[in-house]
Image: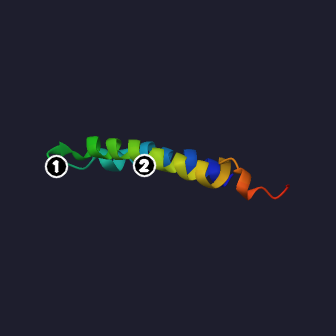
Amino acid sequence: MLRVLIGIGIPYLGVLGLLPWVASMDTFVLGVPFIYAWMFAWFVLTSLCLYVCWRFFDRPVDAGRRQDA
């Protein structure tokens, strides 16, 4: 359940849950409207969330760390 929260829940809240708040801002980041910078940042953050899920939950155990040998 935790991996679903990390892999799907956090990006969902970041992109769709906070979108009304982000859309109401008139700030610019490096000359780009904040909403575009926010969406671009979540491309990277979503990949990071998926990497964390893979690293801690789904990564295959290598031969050196197997306990059944």
**Residue 13 in sight in this render:** no
Indicate the position of residue 38 as horizontal and vertical percent values.
32, 46
Front-most of residues 15 and 57: 57
Front-most of residues 40 and 35: 40
Q: Which mark is residue 45?
A: 2
Residue drawn at x 63%, y 55% as measured from the top left: 56
Q: Which residue is mark 1?
A: 30
Task: Indicate left or right for 47 with 40 as reference.
Answer: right
Residue drawn at x 33%, y 42% as measured from the top left: 40
* Disc 2 residue type (three-letter): Leu
* Disc 1 residue type (three-letter): Leu
**Residue 38 in sight in this render:** yes
Secondary element type, mark 1? loop
Task: Indicate left or right for 12 with 18 as reference.
Answer: right
The number of discs equals 2
Q: CA distance from mark 1 to mark 2?
A: 19 Å
Indicate the position of residue 30 as horizontal and vertical percent values.
16, 49
Indicate the position of residue 11 as horizontal and vertical percent values.
48, 46
Front-most of residues 43 and 11: 43
Residue drawn at x 47%, y 49% as measured from the top left: 48
Q: Earlier in the sequence, mark 1 or mark 2?
A: 1
Question: How packed is label 1: few (under 14 Cα within 10 Å), some, or many (20 or more)?
Answer: few
Task: Indicate left or right for 30 with 44 as reference.
Answer: left
Question: How packed is label 2: few (under 14 Cα within 10 Å), some, or many (20 or more)?
Answer: some
